[in-house]
Image (cartoon, helix red, strand yellow):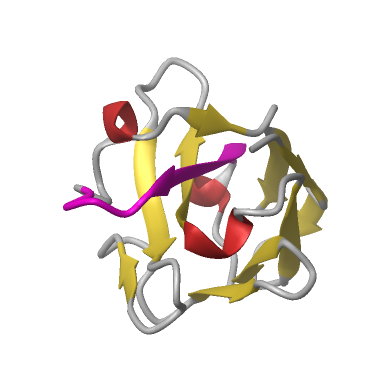
Amino acid sequence: VQLQAFGGGLVQAGGSLRLSCAASGRTFSSYSMAWFRQAPGKEREFVTAIRWSGSRTYYADSVKGRFIISKDNAKNTVYLQMNSLKPEDTAVYYCAGEKDYGLKYWEATEYDYWGQGTLVTVSS
């Protein structure tokens, strides 16, 4: 499966932004999906993940209550709705996908498929 992330941009603190990750391939519905982010000078970190069926979601503590992940299998797309954005949310956001065989959602190394990244900048 090939992934393409888009929707990043510049937003003021407290604002909202929605990222999308479009997938090619007919097996998208069987993939669990995640968003990771990487700020300048920092390691890539887990943000959120959703199981292939959409039945369960997982969030990093830093975004819990502010971000929402969703998956539309009919559109082959996963979304990240980001609300109440903070300057510390500034990063390049990557979507990732993998078939769910005991997947450790929070581990970037578990995912074979990655989008190209989209930059989110939150100004104070």
Q: Position of residue 112 (x, y in %)?
A: 44, 28
What residue lies at 72% left-to-right and 46% top-to-bottom? Answer: 25
In the visual, does 102 lie left or right of 115? left
Query: Is 59 situated above or below 5?
Result: below
User: In the image, 40: left or right of 119?
Assistant: left
Horizontal relation, residue 68 to residue 12: left or right: left
Magenta stretch holds residue 10: no
Note whether 31 is above or below 115 in the view shown: below
Q: Position of residue 45 (x, y in %)?
A: 35, 37
Q: Residue furthest top?
A: 41
Residue at the location (74% across, 66% down)?
18
Q: How many labels does the image show?
A: 0
Depth check, front residue: 32 or 17: 32
Q: How far across and down, in percent of the image, does residue 124 sit?
A: 65, 53
Q: Viewer-proximal residue, 20 or 31? A: 31
The answer to whether 50 appears left or right of 1 in the picture is left
Along the line of sight, the residue nearer the viewer: 74 or 95: 74
Front residue of this view, candidates 114 and 37: 114
Q: Residue at x 29, y 60 (%)?
A: 60
Q: Look at the image and give the residue range highlighted in magenta.
A: 91-103
Q: Main secondary structure of the magenta part?
A: strand
Relative image position of residue 34 (x, y in whole percent): 46, 52
Q: In this view, does 104 lie above or below 30?
A: above
Q: From the image, which quarter does the N terminus lie in?
A: top right
Asked if the stretch drawn in magenta spans residue 93, the answer is: yes
Q: Which residue: 74% across, 65% down?
A: 17
